[in-house]
Image (cartoon, rainbow, N blue to C red):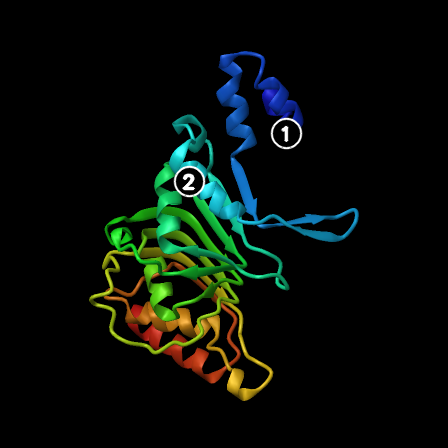
Amino acid sequence: MILTELHNDKQALRTCMLVCRGWLNECRSRIFHTTRVADTFYQPRTALVRLRKKRVQAFSDFLNRSASPGFCSTILVLRLAGTHELAPQTYISVAMLVDILASLPRLRALDLTRLAIERGTSMRYRTRKFALSVLSMHKVHFVDGERGLVDLLCLFSSLGLFDASYVDVPYYMPQPLDDAGISDAIQVNDIRLKGCLRGIRKSDFRPSTVYCLLSLLNDLPRTPRPSSLTLQCGAIKELTSLGTYLTQVG
């Protein structure tokens, strides 16, 4: 009852961790239930943005090298955020995400914000499949184009909610993905997509989030049939992709 009343007071919970071994796990589960690791720290009082270099990379290394199983089992929601928009981007690889997902057995929600995702050189993630209640991506840039986006979706066999907004895929050429390693049994219950990315000049045009992801879902060996679909459409290509998708899922 005491710890339940203190669930919003992390400083008090850190003190309670020192009382006895019986309180340790209870306090730890409340402190790290939702964990945010960011390369940017915003100070509301001074309205300043302070950079913290390679925090995401350091967190991944910590999970692989020295994190205890008790600590890893307490994280249910993980939010990884890169640097501020005006600062150099934070780069992570799909292989790094596999290491993080494999280290957190009870993870239910993963949020990726302001990150640049690379494919990396390791192919071991092809054999790993995970299930999440929520996967959200906001202002994520895929360095390797659609192949990086494919590799990310390769990691999951089922998603309760797939929420993506302003996802930047520099170039997208729809193509058959039968040999891409995506599970043919991938299931997504709720899909929410929004965000149209366009440059100032026509030559800077970027395919929109809705177009890229709907086209990719259409190309999967077995198109996911969600129970709910929420989109923000504003271009002919997006509406065309939506029509193709609805035709496939019935």
Choose top left, top right, bottom left or bottom right for residue 170: bottom left
Nearest the viewer among 55 and 195 is 55
Of labels 2 and 1, earlier in sequence is: 1
Q: Is residue 118 left or right of residue 197?
A: left
The answer for how far apart the CA atoms under marks 2 and 1 are is: 20 Å
**SS state under label 2:** loop
Residue 99 lies, in percent from the top left, at 36, 44
Which of the 4 image quadrants contains residue 93?
Answer: bottom left
User: Residue placed at 54% from the left, 61% from the top?
Assistant: 89
Name the residue beneath numbered marker 1: 10
Secondary element at image label 1: helix
* View extreme (top): residue: 20
Q: Residue at x 62, y 58 (%)?
A: 84
Question: Residue 215: x percent and y percent?
Answer: 36, 73
Quadrant (top left, top right, bottom left, bottom right) of the C terminus: bottom left
Name the residue that disc number 2 marks: 107
Left or right, residue 84 beside residue 132: right
Q: Amino acid at mark 1?
A: Lys
Dot 1: few (<14), some (14–19), or many (≥20) neighbours within 10 Å? some
Q: Amino acid at mark 2?
A: Leu
Q: Residue at x 46, y 77 (%)?
A: 207
Is residue 121 among the parts visible in the rendering?
A: yes
CB atoms of marks 2 and 1 within 8 Å: no
Query: Which of the two residues, 152 or 88, is positioned nearer the viewer here?
Result: 88
**Residue 245 position by quadrant:** bottom left
